[in-house]
Image (tube, helix red, strand yellow):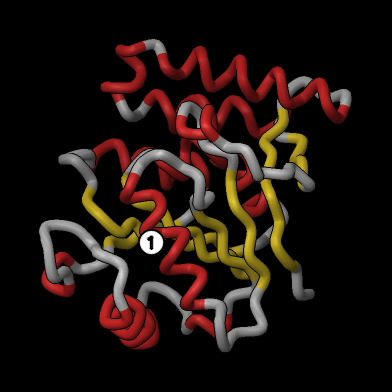
Amino acid sequence: MRVLVITAHADDLELSMGGTVRKFIEKGDVVDNVIMVDNGGRDEAIEKSTKLLGHKTVFFPKDLYEEDRPVMSSKLVADFEEWLSQNNFTAKLKEYDLIVTHWKEDWHQDHRTCYDLVQSLKRNQPIGVMYFDAIPYNQKYTNFDINVFFNVTNQMKAKMEAVEAFKDFYEMGLEERIKSYNFYRGQFIKVRFAECFKIENMIM
């Protein structure tokens, strides 16, 4: 399976689905992460994280922005599709089996832009779409009906090492909250740690 993860920032993938990404990689799947905004000067952390989890990361070019960050428009969609088709790092959109991104009720505007982008990208594609449960931005979710759980107990060590690579979060103690949240979600499926998602459709 080939998976495209579209996130707003460096660290979004690690915090929300690092264990699941590692699980996919262990199964032999390919995971590509497109970061839409910027890396916040975190090149070293990104390099370490990709080695730990096994995915690949690429940044959407800033010269394609109309503003200081991506703004949802038909131009952004067209630019993204064209860039993706020409970029040697990732596959063409139609070659992916699954897109994973932020949920629409996320309070972070950059995150919601990723959701809106995916809604347009999927319009002519027979492709699966799944949304991750992003702490702490999920506090205002009201329509996020979790219907997929991944047991990431065996992948939790790699996930936490990837999270800790982003030292600013590590220093704030956020990694303990993430671990506790994944422990809480694990109780739903009687495992130690789990990550959860809302899947819109799956085409296999």
Q: How many marks?
A: 1
Q: Position of residue 39 (x, y in %)?
A: 23, 46
Q: Amino acid at mark 1?
A: Val
**Residue sitting at the far right:** 190
**Residue that numbered label 1 is attached to:** 34
Q: Position of residue 16 (x, y in %)?
A: 53, 38
Q: In front: 120, or 50?
A: 120
Please give the name of the residue rendered at 67% of the width and 70% of the height, measured from the top-left corner.
128
Q: In front: 29, or 100?
A: 100
The residue carrying pointer 1 sits among few (fewer than 14), some (14 to 19) or many (20 or more) residues within 10 Å by Cα, namely many
SS of the residue under disc 1 = strand
Q: Quadrant of residue 81?
A: bottom left
**Image position of 60 with respect to 193: above or below:** below
Answer left or right for 123 relative to 65.
Answer: right
State the quadrant of the N terminus. Answer: bottom right
Q: In front: 89, or 202?
A: 202
Answer left or right for 189 relative to 23.
Answer: right
Please give the name of the residue rendered at 65% of the width and 44% of the height, measured from the top-left corner.
143
Please give the name of the residue rendered at 41% of the width and 53% of the height, measured from the top-left corner.
112
Please give the name of the residue rendered at 48% of the width and 77% of the height, measured from the top-left corner.
121
**Image position of 67 with respect to 123: above or below:** above
Q: Position of residue 58 (x, y in %)?
A: 32, 62
